[in-house]
Image: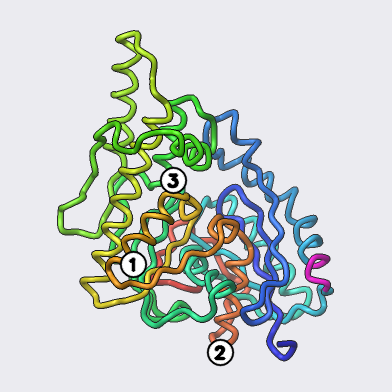
């Protein structure tokens, strides 16, 4: 393993400052500094706050990752950094830091796609990805279905959200229920005490024949249902609302993902992104994949949320396949399409 390059990855697309170090498919360090508490009082991520937090956390988080991996800066063979998509200011902090590190050490730099990195991180846990596979990526900013012939060279978007992403809907519904921010973990916990069949919330674009998602209508339906209870002076059954809302989301996500697998003759499904940590999504996906004869891969929850390990994993894959490094003029592209795996 020591013959394989040592790659350090930096992730700053949103509110997590992540630094990961890998050698091949072996994860040596995964250091994270989160600014989520700074955003909680606003009920969502504030871009300017996130950028400042990345500036403050970058140096200490890099130092912690090196210490955890037991390596020195001079041991690093290549750097990788999220170049997009994400918050423009937050991306710029990570890209600027990675450029400085790569230039000072004379090492190659790879600007990588955040979504492709979410796919690639599974290799750190379950080994090389099947070719091809289907990836369902669900987070606060993205709800996408990808066909992945080769994570380091060819990724195609087959479906995405037309409005709110799944994670965004979780945050907004949590706000309606006064459960705080971020909404995903707390709704997951509350839903375990509720009845997922208690309320028949709508399933957007469920049978429209596309691979796209829509969660804005579901979010609004939950808000209107809660408002109706409050106007009538009746108590809101928070656990039932949480469970019924969550069931509507994961039902659509898994139904669409399995449809892509069936329609394209693919027998391997990967789920990634922050919402992939949701216990009901993981359980329903496992149940439906087994029934459909599809193999399911889901990284452990810590690797589902934004982290530097996923960036390092994709950087390591690019090095292994002989991909050309990025230029030091590498930009940060907040709307980088998934087809652009590197910049």
Q: Is residue 21 left or right of residue 207?
A: right
Mark 2–mark 1 Cα distance, whole angstroms, equals: 36 Å
Give the residue pinned by disc 1.
290
* Residues shaded magenta: 66-70
| In front of the other: 217 or 293 | 293
Q: Which of disc 3 and disc 1 is earlier in sequence?
A: 3
Give the residue pinned by disc 3.
167
Which secondary structure lies at badge 2? loop
Disc marking residue 322: 2
Q: Which of disc 2 and disc 3 is earlier in sequence?
A: 3
Which secondary structure lies at badge 1? helix
In the image, which is nearer the foreground, mark 3 or mark 2? 3
Which secondary structure lies at badge 3? helix
Mark 1–mark 3 Cα distance, whole angstroms, equals: 25 Å
Disc marking residue 17: none
Instruction: Decide whether residue 69 is among the magenta residues.
Output: yes
Instruction: Decide whether residue 2 is among the magenta residues.
Output: no
Q: Is residue 317 left or right of residue 225?
A: right
């Amino acid at each position: 393993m020591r013959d394989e390059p040592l790659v350090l990855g930096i992730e700053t697309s949103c509110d997590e400052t992540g630094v990961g170090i890998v050698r091949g498919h072996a994860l040596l360090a995964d250091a994270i500094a989160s600014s989520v508490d700074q955003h909680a009082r606003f009920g969502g991520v504030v871009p300017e706050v996130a950028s400042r937090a990345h500036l403050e956390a970058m140096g200490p988080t890099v130092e912690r990752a090196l210490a955890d991996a037991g390596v020195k800066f001079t041991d690093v063979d290549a750097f990788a950094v999220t170049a997009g998509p994400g918050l423009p200011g937050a991306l710029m902090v990570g890209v600027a830091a990675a450029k400085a590190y790569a230039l000072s050490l004379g090492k190659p730099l790879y600007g990588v796609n955040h979504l492709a990195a979410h796919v690639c991180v599974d290799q750190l846990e379950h080994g090389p990805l099947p070719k091809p596979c289907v990836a369902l990526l669900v987070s606060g900013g993205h709800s996408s279905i990808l066909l992945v012939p080769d994570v380091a060279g060819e990724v195609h978007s087959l479906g995405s959200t037309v409005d709110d992403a799944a994670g965004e809907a979780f945050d907004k519904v949590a706000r309606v229920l006064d459960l705080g921010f971020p909404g995903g973990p707390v709704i997951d916990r509350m839903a375990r005490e509720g009845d997922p069949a208690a309320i028949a919330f709508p399933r957007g674009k469920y049978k429209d024949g596309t691979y796209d998602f829509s969660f804005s209508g579901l979010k609004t339906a939950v808000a209107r249902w809660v408002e109706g209870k409050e106007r009538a002076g009746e108590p809101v059954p928070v656990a039932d609302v949480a469970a019924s809302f969550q069931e509507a989301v994961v039902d659509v996500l898994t139904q669409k993902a399995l449809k892509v697998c069936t329609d394209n003759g693919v027998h391997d499904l990967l789920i990634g992104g922050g919402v992939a940590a949701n216990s009901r999504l993981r359980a329903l996906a496992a149940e439906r994949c087994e029934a459909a004869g599809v193999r399911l891969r889901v990284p452990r929850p810590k690797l589902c949320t934004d982290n530097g390990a996923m960036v390092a994993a994709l950087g390591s894959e690019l090095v292994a396949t002989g991909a050309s490094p990025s230029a030091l003029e590498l930009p940060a592209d907040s709307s980088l399409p998934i087809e652009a795996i590197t910049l």
